[in-house]
Amino acid sequence: MSTNSKVLQLLRNAELSPDKGSAKEALNGKLNELKDGQILINRYGDGSKCIIGIAYVKDDDKKMFLLESGASDESVSAALARITNLSGFEGDTYVANSGVDFIDNATSLNDADKKLSAAIKEVSDSSKEAIKSIEQKVEPDKYTRQTADQYITTSVGNKLESFQLKFTPLSPSTLKMPSAMGDLAQGTTAAVLRDMTLSEILDSILFKTVYPTITDPSGTIGFKDSFTNNSIVEVGTVAPQDKNMNYTFNKGVVRVDDGTTANLDYVGDATGVTYTYTYTPGAANTDAGVEIGGTAENNVALKDGKLGLGTYVYRGTIAYNGGTQFKDSKGNMTNPMQTTNKGEVANPHLAGNLNASNTLSINVSAPVYIDKNADGNFTKNALQKWGSMKFTGIALSGTSADKPLQIKTPRKLKSVNSYNKVSGKYDTPQLDNFTLTDPAVQETINGVTVNYFLYKWTGGSLGGGNYEIMTY
């Protein structure tokens, strides 16, 4: 028998009652002095027999089990052994049943034995249902709504059962929270809280959920070799191919600002890129004497060929794999997931593609040639973007009718001014001294034929100086 068990407590009454009836009355008279489960023995007659009384005391309910026995120690010990064997008193709790048929009116020892046996069996069965222990269910890592505040009971008979503690509001079920507290939103009713565990409510108040902040994936494109962005190249240059391009890719970030959760990539690795271009041909200009530079193209895949006069704009579309699932500060991986800056988003982010955040441009033009020394040898000037071109500070030698200065340009001249040392400006007009002598000079540039206009000096002798030349 365990040390913390409640046991039968044996007491002997020193008095000798004259008969059995007197002995029973004596035992019942002592009931108020006894504790639940205590046993009192009272001998009667010549002292060879006794009545064994077992006290049942529960609150105001007090009664006595009675059993006849021999008065010797051996007889009493045998009777008590039989009682303990029947009742299974091992355990923390001894349960008496006030509803049993008490045996104080038994007519014989055999009859009393039967009634006592039945009573004690019922007591024993009830004892097995009694709670022996209550333990909280412990989770090794994290409690969930289903496991928080869950307790396991073990009965005397080793039957396991579980229950969960829920919040029991004292307020009316329709009463609403006047303001938000943590994750509990303003307007939450007491009825809703009634379905939550105590831990869930406290956790919601103390640890407001921190939702992810999303940085979208991004990418850029660039020229790998041969070209630079916004560069000016000659007409007929071989067009860029995929091999001349490269790109960068950033997978984006999932950030939870709780000081604990590690950052994650928002999407997976890049799987490839598609490059396209849009071509805007040089515009027709009557004053400049030029027609449209070619046929416009829009969002066309890179291809072999040569660049025509005008502007090319390059774009990239980068494909990527899907990302991994991410969590909020409480470890929830809902789909869709609420975020701090993008509303609800798919979780995980699916595979997809994005447009590069930048574009690349190439301006295609034709050079202006100037016979600077009036000797018939033309010098190619630095390329300027196709359109009105302006060349300032061009040093020209002296000129005459037999050794004229010459200008060969893909666009008609708008002005030619020489430098005025007095004013410090290019404000001396000289265009009238240049005559368009050939409006259809054909020049081949990188395999592309371009029409040029040839101007010659016809203004007589003039010393050398600096000039500013502008085309339409």
Image (cartoon, rainbow, N blue to C red):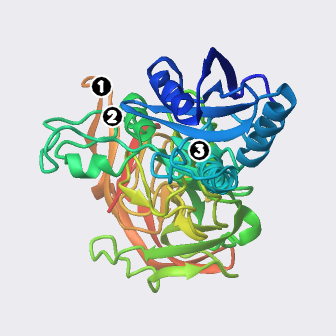
Residue 318 lies, in percent from the top left, at: 61, 66
Image quadrant holding the C terminus, namely bottom left
In this figure, which residue is indicated by the disc labeled 2?
182
Q: Which mark is residue 424?
A: 1
Name the amino acid type tagged 3: Ala
Q: Residues within 10 Å of mark 2 (few under 14, many from 20)?
A: some
* Nearer the observer, 361 or 222: 222
Q: Which mark is residue 74?
A: none
**Distance from Cα at disc 3 to Cα at disc 2:** 41 Å
Labels 2, 1: front one: 2
**Distance from Cα at disc 3 to Cα at disc 1:** 114 Å
Name the N-terminal-most of marks 3 and 1. 3
Q: Quadrant of residue 38?
A: top right
Name the amino acid type tagged 1: Gly
In this figure, which residue is indicated by the disc labeled 3?
130
* Nearer the observer, 277 or 321: 321
Name the outermost residue toward the top. Answer: 14
The kind of secondary structure element at disc 3 is loop
* Nearer the observer, 362 or 171: 171
Name the N-terminal-most of marks 2 and 1. 2
